[in-house]
Image: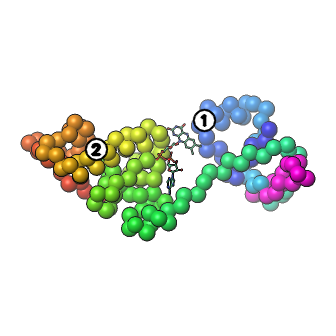
Amino acid sequence: MTMIHMLDKWQGMDTYVEEIQASKIRTMLETETVEIRGDGKVETVVVKNKKTEATQELPMDLVSINIGFLMDTKAIRSWGLELEGNQIKVDNIMNTNIKGVLSCGDIATYPGKYKLLITACSEGAAAANTAYIYVKQPKKFTVGELYAAPKEEGDTQPKASESPA
Ligand SMILES: Cc1cc2nc3c(=O)[nH]c(=O)nc-3n(C[C@H](O)[C@H](O)[C@H](O)COP(=O)(O)OP(=O)(O)OC[C@H]3O[C@@H](n4cnc5c(N)ncnc54)[C@H](O)[C@@H]3O)c2cc1C
């Protein structure tokens, strides 16, 4: 098995990287796959070293391509949402720049953002709470909001959140 990576260092968790390095898997950094050759099935893969531009043809039975994916933000750009790169800017309770439009999960961003399952779930809970308050305008704090929303002593209504930084 050969792992080919375009960058000059691995991006995985340290323990995984160490396990791979200690294994029999051959690794190639700063290397690009330029061609897959074969007659009806994979036989060889042509790779190019990005630094030296040198190419080599590696015998191969199977190719597994893990190159991520490209976000398509065409639609959200047309909605007038404020973006930072490919992500939607939100405040700490998931408000976007458009009142009543919330965002959470990987697509949302704020200072200190982590793209993780647990943060996406937590942001989902915050967004649901913010949506509830926006739609229902409850007279008193909801349980979730009691812990989440910006408030001062004596407040019975959530404060309007500041627009995303
Ligand atoms: C390789 C990899 C490994 C990861 N490992 C971990 C890990 O170990 N631990 C961890 O906590 N996190 C990990 N993550 C991050 C984690 O997967 C994400 O943070 C999490 O899935 C974000 O959830 P989400 O619901 O915001 O987005 P997603 O899970 O990406 O869900 C978005 C959904 O929306 C759908 N969608 C997109 N466009 C449209 C459209 N126009 N109409 C309808 N549906 C649409 C997509 O198909 C997708 O199903 C990993 C991510 C990757 C890529």
The residue that appears at 28% across and 60% down in the rendered structure is: 99
Horizontal and vertical percent position of residue 107? 45, 53
- Whether residue 49 appears in this view of the structure is no
**Amino acid type of disc 1?**
Asp
117 relative to 136, above or below: above
Relative depth, front residue between 4 and 29:
4
Colour scheme shown: rainbow
Image side of residue 32 versus residue 115, left or right: right
Q: Position of residue 32 (x, y in %)?
A: 75, 55
Q: Quadrant of the N terminus?
A: top right
Residue at the disc numbered 1: 14
Q: Secondary structure at mark 2?
A: helix
Other-residue count near label 1 (Cα within 10 Å), few / some / many at <14 / 14–19 / ≥20: few
Task: Please say whether residue 50 is one of the residues in the magenta stretch.
Answer: yes
Ranked by sequence position, the earlier of labels 1 and 2 is 1
Residue visible at 32% across and 61% down?
97
Q: Which mark is residue 74?
A: none
In the rendered image, the residue lying farthest to the right is 39
Extent of the magenta region: 34-51
Q: According to the image, label 2 marks what residue?
A: 129
Q: Residues within 10 Å of mark 2 (few under 14, many from 20)?
A: some
Which secondary structure lies at badge 1?
helix
Inter-mark Cα distance, 1 to 2 = 36 Å
Is 99 left or right of 42, judged from the image as shown? Answer: left
Answer above or below: position of 50 versus 121: below
Q: Position of residue 45 (x, y in %)?
A: 84, 51
Mark 2 close to ligand 1, CB under 8 Å:
no
Specify the amino acid type for callout 2.
Answer: Asn
State which quadrant residue 47 falls in.
Answer: bottom right
Q: Nearer the viewer, mark 1 or mark 2?
A: 2
Name the one closer to the observer, 76 or 119. 76
